[in-house]
Amino acid sequence: MIIKDKGYFMELNKVDKLVQSRAKILIFAAFAFALWQFSWIGADIVKDTESSFIHIITGLVILGSILWVIACYFFYVFSKKVKKANALQALNDELTHKNKLQAFMAGYFILFGMIWLVIPATDFWDFDLILIIRAIAVLAIVIPILIFSYLEFKNDQGAE
């Protein structure tokens, strides 16, 4: 069925742009969060050494935290755009729920896969398990966000 109402297509176009914007913001936020947290883990690893590398890592921690604050601002601006376009329901459709579920399930299996890989690895290597758990937790946050964003882009490309 073809709808010739230009207002409908205009609204659909706004929603498509908001979907793309949401995916881009999520990718940026995942990158910022990962940089911030992995750099922080790196700083904890080298803090007891006399390495000059600590200054670079500290700089990355600061950069990552600043990027995270910027990502939070982008989320705020995005929420204002959604409210202005009255598109909350359109952005929270069945396809979005399906993508969220797929991303969550993939993240769940990856998370437990990493845990089950670390358990036998502790028999062969001496790890600081707190650092490993923190790294796994960061990946458990970042990977589903990236998968969700990928699915949103993929579905948006298929809709054209």
Image (cartoon, rainbow, N blue to C red):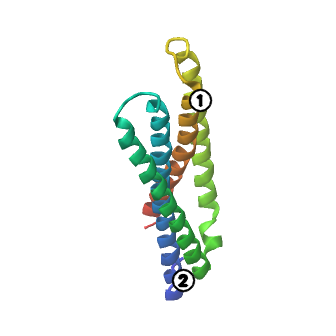
Q: Residue at x 63, y 72 (%)?
A: 88
Crowd tier of the residue under label 1, counting other residues whose Cα lies within 10 Å: few below 14, some 14–19, many 20 or above:
few
Q: Residue at x 55, y 23 (%)?
A: 118
Q: Secondary structure at mark 2?
A: helix
Q: CA distance from mark 1 to mark 2?
A: 52 Å
Q: Tell me, yes or no, if residue 113 can be seen here.
A: no
Q: Secondary structure at mark 1?
A: helix
- Number of marks in the rendered image: 2
> Quadrant location of residue 112?
top right
Residue in front for this viewpoint, 79 or 85: 79
Left/right of residue 99 with respect to residue 9 in the rendered view:
right
Q: x, y percentage for residue 154?
A: 45, 56
Q: In the rendering, which numbered label is found on residue 130?
A: 1
Q: Residue at x 48, y 63 (%)?
A: 70
Give the residue type at disc 1.
Ile
Q: x, y percentage for residue 68?
A: 50, 57
**Residue that carries the numbered disc 2 in the rendered image:** 8
Looking at the rendered image, the disc whose residue lies closer to the viewer, 1 or 2, is 1
